[in-house]
Amino acid sequence: MPDQADIMLTVEDAACWFDVSPPWLARVVERRPRRLLKAVDGVSFTVRRGTTFSIVGESGCGKSTLARLVVGLIQPTRGRLSFGRVDEAAGAGAAPRVQMIFQDPYASLNPRWRVADIIAEPIRELGLMRHSVDIEARVAELLGLVGLARNDACRYPHEFSGGQRQRISIARALATQAHFLVCDEPTSALDVSVQAQILNLMRALQAELNLTYLFISHNLAVVRHMSDEIAVMYLGRIVEQAPAEELFAAARHPYTRLLLDTIPDLEAPNRSRAPLAGEVPNPIDPPAGCAFHPRCARAVERCRTETPELRTIAGGRAACHLVEQAA
Amino acid sequence: MTAPAAGPVLEVRDLEVAFDTRHGRLRAIDGVSFAIHPGEILGVVGESGAGKSLTGAAVIGLLEPPGRIVGGEIRLAGRRIDDLPPAQMRALRGREIGAIFQDPLTSLNPLLRIGDQIVETIRTHLPMSDREARAKALELLVAVGIPAAETRIDHYPHQFSGGMRQRVVIALALCAGPKLIIADEPTTALDVSIQAQITGLLKRLCREHRTAVMLVTHDMGVIAETADRVAVMYAGRVVEIGPVDEVIHRPRHPYSVGLMASIPSVRHRAASLRQIDGSMPRLDSMPTGCAFHPRCPRCLPRCTSERPALEPAGIARAACFVAAEAPAHA
């Protein structure tokens, strides 16, 4: 266990269920039952200070819901999220400031505001600085930090490319002197050469400002590049968690193995791959037992009935009966 | 079906597409040439705004006004198609050229059962009775791997998942036995595990039917596993074209070199990714000479004024003075 002071975020058995029941009348007249979408269902993990914890998974696995839980945009149905304390001259033992960077840099910036106002908004809102001269200087400093020019402050978002807009989002997040950034697919909307610029910038900023990242992505190559620790999600649950290098060297869970096998590889393209059959099941009506069993080549009878627990194994955690037996 | 012609299925020569605006003519495609042979998959890669989708739209005759072809020619199996009247072009689309787009939901009519959509397309192009067309539709749905096709044929698009919808779109593109398929980002909206299924399917069907494919994508991994040859586009031009292995592992053009190096690898973790500084020039401020020169780490004085042509570089072809002079760049 890492040192308590070292932990930035603890998530304990967090769950987030959405009520997707048919309307009351339909339930009464047609006797249709209530239905729950268990977007996140019993997820626990800890994030250490100054590291990057990544969550990967396919669409509908609950990774974005988890990001929203962490920043507090939605409340958990069950479970607890708690942040570590940060020691600062200003407020010793204060909770860390959490900010979010969104996927779409076109939708996350107000098109009618100048960049200076966008970046200054959190400073003004949180009352971090009073004098407009200080704020102006801080905005210029932040722009420099993310690789934009000082005079970009008086331009509007539409004058920037996607990559530059994502830099503005990052500057806005850092304006609060944030300690913890939740990044939900920050580079998915960007071209690869621009993605490289943003990923490099994020790593440089992490080293410089000792930031902690919760990094959400579906792209395993990007995740490998960024992460210290990786959790793989499938239908609302973590199926495997391990340090990045561990996970890529020896993935345990069949789903992780499948993900690693299906990503096209530039260095050794597998041109005659046998693609995996099946699709991600509907999260409203997940399969019984292990949610992955209908797609799993190694599924046994027990997998169809009993949901595997996330258990600690050498080098990480995995939720799979077979891995458990082998260990 | 006629026997495949000996020459290329698609031949594009010096294609130029421009938009006439109040501020003058913007040239979005500037002298693009390539050919695709029967059964071959040509990957077209590039970043947003490179003109890759526009090239596909020009070939299929679906350029949005004010965009139009202002130069060059497009030949399908030897016959010139870029100057056909709209009615003839419409007869060609679907019959000779099939199309697969990024979003399978918007390429299907939400109000029609998928079987009816396929039957409609078949009967528009081929002399078949309703019954024959439906049998053929079912056969196609089985071929693209729709489980329980006999019942699924009467379902509506919203009843299918994204991957299944894209299979239906592929069936629709193939239904009249086209010579050429334009696939514009066919897997971008899909999850990785589904992506592999769709590219595998596309590859298998095109081998079987000897259909030529123009695969437009920004995902180099998809190209590496699917395409036979690849054309790298930058700012409306083809900067490098050649066998996929060669271009990916031994790129010659500095842009291709930068592009390949900027892709994070799943095999190892680099200290930092190689990045290409700056961004692609806008159409209204296209640099003189080589369009890549302001971002190029190996720019020569000549590059700023003179435009390089596609010249042989190894077994590929690259449009670069530096690549032509000093071949291999490790």
Image (cartoon, rainbow, N blue to C red):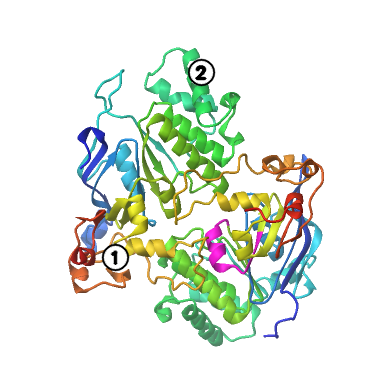
Q: Is residue A326 left or right of residue B89?
A: left
- B60 in the magenta segment: no
Q: Position of residue B314 (x, y in %)?
A: 71, 62
The amino acid marked with disc number 2 is Glu
Q: Nearer the viewer, residue B136 or A229?
A: A229
Q: Is residue A38 above or below residue A226?
A: below
| SS assignment at label 2 | helix
Q: Position of residue B232 (x, y in %)?
A: 66, 57
Mark 2 neighbour density, 10 Å: few (under 14) some (14–19) many (20 or more): some
Q: Nearer the viewer, residue A278 or B136?
A: A278
Q: Position of residue A102 (x, y in %)?
A: 44, 41
Is the Cβ of the residue at disc 1 closer than 8 Å to that at disc 2?
A: no
The amino acid marked with disc number 1 is Phe
Q: In the drawing, what numbered circle is on residue A136?
A: 2
Q: What stretch of residues is rendered in magenta?
A: B218-231
Residue at (82% x, 46% y) in the render: B306
Q: Quadrant of the N terminus of chain B?
A: bottom right
Q: Is residue B297 left or right of residue A127?
A: right
Q: In the drawing, what numbered circle is on residue A292?
A: 1
Q: Is residue A250 above or below residue B168?
A: above
Q: Tell which subunit mark 1 falls on.
A: A
- B224 in the magenta segment: yes
Mark 1 neighbour density, 10 Å: few (under 14) some (14–19) many (20 or more): many
Residue B273 visible? The answer is yes
Q: CA distance from mark 1 to mark 2?
A: 52 Å
Q: In the drawing, what numbered circle is on residue A227?
A: none
Q: Is residue B328 left or right of residue A214?
A: right
Q: Tell which subunit mark 2 falls on.
A: A
Q: Position of residue A284 (x, y in %)?
A: 29, 59
